[in-house]
Image (cartoon, coloured by chain):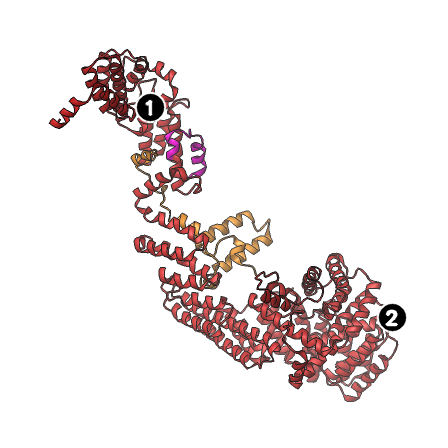
Amino acid sequence: MSRRNKKQKARESNSQLLQRAERELAKGNAKTALKDAKVAFRNDPVPDARRLLETAYAGRVEQLHRQNLLSEAQAVLRDLLDFKPVDPNVCERLPLLQVLVGDKAADPAVVFARQPELLNELTDKAILDWKALAPEYADLPRQVAAVRDALTAIESGEDERATELLQEIPRTSPLGDWKLFARGLSAFYQQDKDRTAANWQRLDPARPANQIARTLQAAAGDMSEQAAADVERGVKRLNARLGSGQGFEQLASLSQSWRSGDWRTFCDELRRFRARHGTAHTATLQRIAELAWRRAVRESDYDFFARLKGCLPAPELDPKWSRAWALFSEHSRDGDVDAVEKAWKAYALDVRGVSCLRDDERPIAEGLVYLRLGTKFIEFAEYNASRMLARWAGDDEEDQLRKDAAGFLRQSIEACPRLEDAYRELAELHEESEDLDKAAAVYKKLLKQVPDDFDSHIWLARFYLEQEEPESAKVYTSGARRLKPRDPQCVALAWSQQLATVRHLAKKRKLDDARAELKKLHEIRPAEIDLSLLDVVAAAIEFKAKNPEAANKFVDDALARFEEPTAVWLQMSCAAARYSLPKEIKKQFDERFKEAIQQPPTSQTAGYLAKFFASLKSNQINYTGRATQERLALAYLARTTSIAWTESDLCQVCEFLFMCPRQHRLVEKLSEIGLALYPKSPRLLFCAGTAGTRLGPHCCDVDHVLKCLRSAIELNGQASLPMNSSQVESARESLSDLEDFAERKRNIGFGFRAYEDDADDELDGDDDDDFDDDDDMDLGGIDMLPPDIDVDKVIDTMPPELKKQMKQVAAMAGMSLKDVIMGTLSMGIAEELKKQSQPRGGGRTPQTNQTNFGFADDE
Amino acid sequence: MNDPYQILGVSHAADEAAVRARYLELVRQFPPDREPDRFAEIHEAYDRVRDPVVSLEHRLFDVSAPFTFESLIADARPDVRSSRLPTELLLSLARP
């Protein structure tokens, strides 16, 4: 001690020393307190100084025990015992101190009986610090050693040995907690979550084994962040000790900004993370890039995308970000054609050199990129087409887009000839341009690649039937039948093809062959085909063979199948034209038909006429005199409002009339009659509902139409004459549109205009988008005409041809030209909006329950 | 046809082994003799997923998230289970 300190000590009074000793003792600094207490007692051995010295001795023993300095603790305890303590508090602590320092003279049972928690504390201490001694009580030292050995065994992977070691520890032992911990630890390393939980859930929450277990579970991600808050420091310590955990904390904090969408913070944190841990976390950064660019594209967030490019490595599949940019351009509202084209073309070049693709994958990837570009261009063309009517634009732009699309699809096929979708898209494109020969060539190429492509066989079979080339059609019909012999399309095609073959042979005067093929036709006749058709064909062959007696016999057979002859004369007239029979024969049957159709109408004949002409219409079959016959048939149907109808015939007639112009009133009337006679017929209910929707929601009785369509859908399941699938779909769509309309009408009032709402919003600066674009679309474009369009002016400036067509449409729908123009303009606007949310989709067309009538594809 | 990945119940980012494991699991669940239709659907979806064109199409153009950010964090988390910790380190975790 320096002289100065000695002097200072000397200057201190005894009471000051005692006060300081007491302060130090309260602070847990027993060593200094003991020193000061000794000096104070030596100076003046008053009772207070003695009491303090005894307390300081006891405190020092406990302190040394905590520091595992057992021999020093024993020495201090001996000093205390030699001092013969008198202070009752110290005397009471003496047995505990003796147990702590391992004094064999002490009786631990007494101490632990008084302080049971001390036993747990001492055993925990003995496990956690292997320098500490286990209390000499019961079998504890051996159990502590067993736990320590078990933990060492688990560390070295000897789990079975650990289990054996732990067996000797009874459940009631203070080491029972450690036994559970060790068992749980073994299960934890074996990835057995259930067994881990089963052991660790039973741990005493106040003891350290539980703390370790929770820390491990939190570090392994088995606990929520909230639940793991109290062991956060332990997890950090563990991660810091494990090399692989570098940067994990920063990474975890990124999830916060990811969730909140705070991209500035996210990108800043990411940049820092990449700078510090980029090398250790290359794969993680790649995965973040995969996740982030997709989100930027999905949310059309260009700012985020631009930031990402600056702080993340480009994805392996997109080394120059061309793909992301292309998708971004596609998703943007503008749909910039040039940007999309440029980016996809750049990406098509990029994929040729992408290292993460195999050699055989690169051409497929390139083909897929061009296929995507092609389909996008088709979408752009369709979008342009939908806008055309609204702005009277020319179709040059649309044509160019389709040409470009075809070019990209060809590039796609060139890059990867096995891309079936590219062929199909290209063929459809040619089909839409009515270039059927090119479409056929594409389907043939597809069949070379995929010989079992059913749809191509069907398409080509139909194509050749339409071209009157039954022999060529036969190849594809057989191909389709080989693949799906029971498919209804195949059955119908086989019939049509055989019928065409018979006609073809008859026209070429190979009459014996024609007769032989006719026999086969009998064998494959579908149930819905009327037998009279076969009689008519046989009659046509015999007329061709100049065998009128046999022919007339077949005609008589056909006549016997009907109540009256109109249907047979019509069929014979048609057959005469299509089989190139002599003029006098055709004239004879024409005249018979014209005479017969003037007779009072019947349900059977009306139904047959409707079925016959619907089949001709849907299969686009024409022959000399057909138009006149159809006109006469329509006049005949107009006279059927007071006959005795059967449900089937009436359905046929209504569905046929939907296909004809200017027949709206008649359909409406016949549907009403039908509903009065057959109120539960879904087909008639559908016809009545559809007739209403044709008037438009403002002109029809919305409630009545809704009721009809709902009933049609409800009753369809158990009906004997149900709607077909396309009618059901059409009914559902119309119902949905009308329900939306009715709902809106209820909420807002009749005659509101979406554009007026928008204009009002603009005027009052209200951002409240009560009715967004999607809602407007649901109206099907009704009442969406912008207020600044002068319809009269539009009519004046329309091209004459278009004006003529519009007038026809108006007459057909029973509306004024102005109404039709307004509706068309509105629908054009609705379509524009719809296109922004729907990638592709054809418009709805009127649906009929068109069965493949006897003449389908052929007559 | 519906998304084959959806039919199999695997993510678009699932690798070949994961898809195969899932397929086998579904086949065990819907054997062809008991659930022929469901089996046919599963089998067709599996064939499509294995088709390199379909799988490449997803890899190239699918903008839906292939995994969540949380799963990314979980995967990057140091694996305390994979290697056995030194007992000394383990016991030091008892310190608050």
Secondary structure state at the residue bearing disc 1: helix
In the depicted view, which residue is nearer to us: A67 or A413?
A67
- Magenta part of the protein: which range? A188-212
- Could you say where residue A754 lies in the image, as x and y percent from the top left? 64, 67
**Which shade of the palette goes to chain B?**
orange
User: Is A813 within the magenta?
Assistant: no
Pointer 2: what residue?
A643
User: Is A199 within the magenta?
Assistant: yes
Q: Which chain is red?
A: A
In the depicted view, which residue is nearer to us: A831 or A505?
A831
- Three-letter amino acid code of the residue under disc 2: Ile
- Is residue A478 in sight in this rendering? no
- Could you say where residue A529 lies in the image, as x and y percent from the top left? 74, 70
- Three-letter amino acid code of the residue under disc 1: Leu
- From the image, state whether disc 1 or disc 2 is nearer to you: 1
Pointer 1: what residue?
A122
In the depicted view, which residue is nearer to us: A346 or A105?
A105
